[in-house]
Amino acid sequence: MSDFGALVSEAFDRLGEFGVLAAVPLVTSLLAFDNFERAAASGEFDFHAGVAFGFPNAVVDLWTFVGLPASDPGVRVAEPFWLVVVVFAVQSALTAGYLGSINQRLDGDRIDFLGNVRRYLVPITAYQALAWGITLVALLGGVLTGPFVLLLFPAFLLLNYLFFAAPYLIVVRDASVGAAIRESYEWAITGGDYFAYGVRYLAAVAAVSIPTTLVAVNLGLVGVAVAAVATAPVGLALSVATTTFVQRNAPA
C-alpha cells in the first residue's frame, strides 16, 4: 500500500504506540537556535505569511512547516563552532534512536531507544554529515557565484526528492550509507509509488505550513513554542507513515 492519505491515517490511528517519541521532533525544533531566534524576532518587525515545501526528512519537526522570512532586520545569529558540533552530535543520536524505534515498533517489538542509538548512530551520523556538508558547500557556492544562488532552492528540493528514503532505508534494511543512497536514488528515478508518495507529501507539508508559519513567525516566543508543541505529533505521524511506506514498498 503506497497511498499517502491511507498511510498517514494509519499512522495517526497508531500514534499512541509511539507517543513518547513525539519528544524528539520537539527537542530538535528547539535545538535549531538560529531558526528559533529568527522566528521569534521576525514578528517584532512586520507581519509575515509564508509557505514551506519539503519531501520527507529523517526527523520532521517544526521547521519542516515554517516558511521563514528571507532576512530579518536586526537579527544576527552566530553560533560558536563547538555548539554547532554538539548540536550535530545530539541531533544525530536523536535521529538514530527515533527512526530505529519507529521501525522497531512497526515490526511489533518494544521500543529500545538507547539500543537503537547504539545500533544506528554511526551510519546516521555519516549520512547527516554528508547532508550537512553538501548543504554548506552549496550555500557557500551560491553566495560566491551571485545569481546562481537562485538555483539553490530547486537544487535542494531535487536532492531531497532523490534521497528522502535513504535514512529510512538505513534502519529498515540495515543498509550502509552508500547502499541506502544508491537504493533511494534508483527508486526515485523510477517514479511510480515513490514519486506519488513524495508529491502528496510535498502538498501536505505546504498545507500545514501556512497556518504554522502564521503562528510561529508572528506571535513571538509564545507562537514558536505553541507551534513546536502542536507540530511534534504531526511530524511523528509523517515519520511513521514514511517508515511504513519504505517497509512495504522499497524495491527488493
Image (cartoon, rainbow, N blue to C red):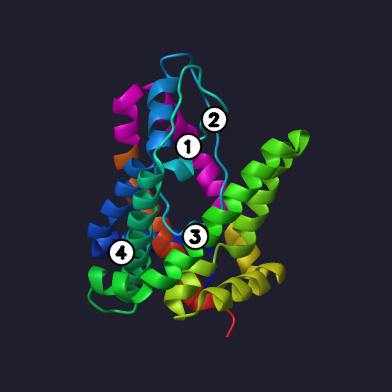
Q: Are marks 2 and 1 in contact (CB under 8 Å)?
A: yes
Q: Amino acid at mark 3?
A: Ala
Q: Secondary structure at mark 3?
A: helix
Tell me: residue 95, above or below residue 103: above
Inter-mark Cα distance, 2 to 3: 29 Å
Q: Which residues are magenta?
A: 199-227
Q: Residue furthest bottom?
A: 252
- Which of the marked residues, 1 or 4, is nearer the chain's N terminus? 4
Q: Please give the residue where the numbered disc 4 appears in the rendered image.
A: 14
- Which of the marked residues, 2 or 1, is nearer the chain's N terminus? 2
Inter-mark Cα distance, 1 to 4: 26 Å
Residue 250 position in % (x across, y down)? 55, 77
Circle on res. 66: 1
Q: Amino acid at mark 2?
A: Gly
Residue 150 position in % (x across, y down)? 72, 37
Could you classify mark 4 by the number of other residues whose Cα lies within 10 Å: few (under 14), some (14-19), or many (20 or more)? some
Q: Is 214 part of what is drawn in magenta?
A: yes
Q: Secondary structure at mark 2?
A: loop
Q: Please give the residue where the numbered disc 3 appears in the rendered image.
A: 129
- Which of the marked residues, 3 or 1, is nearer the chain's N terminus? 1
Residue 231 visible in the picture: no
Classify residue 90 by image quadrant.
bottom left
Residue 154 position in % (x across, y down)? 69, 46
Q: Is 56 part of what is drawn in magenta?
A: no
